[in-house]
Amino acid sequence: MESIAENRRARFDYDIAETCDAGIELTGQEVKSAKSGRMQIAGARVAVRRGEAWLVNSHIPPYQPRNAPADYEEDRARRLLLTREEVKRFAGALQEKGRTLIPLRAHLKHGFIKIELGLGRARKKSDKREALKKRAHEREIRRGE
């Protein structure tokens, strides 16, 4: 699967419990822009409203800026295509304190753009420090061998 965009900070800031793939509803020029690698999901999150999942704070610039419609919004909320059961399950999980649904990466699957979502809990500052120490220790071990 070809990766289009990645939220590298998400795996550092959150402990990811489970992941799933979701489709995304885009306009034609957004698809062309995303396939050319101009999609940004860093800092984005998923909100569940009225039984639907929405990708909020993602950024997709127009494919051809001079040919874009006058009312085009780069940062608009985009609907995610999930089954009703998945939306209900995520909505229930988000009710727990500290749980967040975040996009981990955008990728192509059989020509369609999919978003890999991760259900996670925010890490505390001390947990992040431990992760950095562990990563540095593993790097030293690899160099030594």
Image (tube, rainbow, N blue to C red):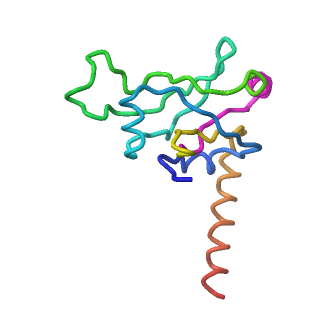
x, y percent for residue 114: 57, 39
x, y percent for residue 98: 73, 32
Judge whether residue 90 is colored magenta: yes
x, y percent for residue 99: 73, 32
Give left or right: position of 123 versus 7: right
Magenta residues span 88-106
Q: Is residue 132 above or below residue 111?
A: below
Looking at this view, name the residue that lies furthest to the top: 50
Judge whether residue 124 is colored magenta: no
Residue at 71 percent across and 39 percent down: it is: 120
Residue at 30 percent across and 35 percent down: it is: 63
x, y percent for residue 109: 57, 45
Q: Which quadrant holds residue 116?
A: top right
Looking at this view, name the residue that lies furthest to the front: 110
Residue at 50 percent across and 22 percent down: it is: 77
Residue at 54 percent across and 50 percent down: it is: 8
Quarter of the image with the C terminus in it: bottom right
